[in-house]
Amino acid sequence: MCTDTIRKTLLESCQEKENIGAIKMGYNLFISHSWSHSDKYTGLIDLLDEQIRFCYKDYSVPRTDPLFIQAKTDIGYKRVLKQKIRDQMRYASVVIILAGVYASYSDSIDMEIEIALELGKPILAVEYWGSERSSTRVISNADDVVKWNSKSIVTAIRALAKWE
């Protein structure tokens, strides 16, 4: 796993590359995840950070900065949530979805798949290391499916990204 020091060094490396014009931009990613499975989200971030020549910006919604919405009982909750997720996802070049079975039972992941399709964003499904089953909903909507491997994930992101 990436330590904060390594993560900071990698971030500084990406910023230096941008400053000297070595790269025009990093990849804008929306990483769909369940907060109840945040260890897998963190593990995916660590895999992305392992790739030295790979820079990205994460547009997902972290637990530390959730989208503020009134209680789920409020009228229009889903409409407001959908718009806020759309606003986050709009800038993404690729939407990454962890394809664990829990995704099959997640209303928010269903909503994120729907939004990604509406926005024409390519979906990359990542199957967690050692998982025996994956969400058929995620797999059937994915443009590409990769295993829990840093190089495979980054290669797929590069192939799917749309430079605008």
Image (tube, rainbow, N blue to C red):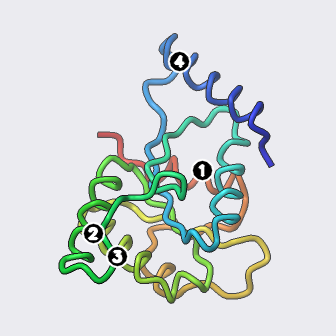
Say which amino acid is labelled 2.
Answer: Lys
The residues bearing labels 1 and 3 have C-alpha atoms spaced at a distance of 26 Å
Q: Where does residue 108 sit, x and y in percent of width and height?
A: 41, 76
Q: Are marks 2 and 4 in contact (CB under 8 Å)?
A: no
Which residue lies under the disc numbered 2?
A: 82
Residue tagged 3: 111
> Quick check: 50 above or below 94?
above
Sequence-earlier tag: 3 or 2: 2
The mark lying in front, picked from 2 and 1, is 2
Which is more toward the observer, 5 or 139? Answer: 5
* Amino acid identity at mark 3: Met
Camera-nearest label, 4 or 3 = 3
- Verify CB contact (< 8 Å) between mark 3 and mark 2: yes
Instruction: Choose between 131 and 62: the one closer to the eye.
Output: 62
Q: Can you identify the residue that label 1 sits on?
A: 155
- Mark 4–mark 3 Cα distance, whole angstroms, equals 37 Å
Q: Real-space Cα distance between discs 2 and 4?
A: 37 Å
Residue annotated with mark 4: 22
Q: Residue at x 64, y 22 (%)?
A: 13
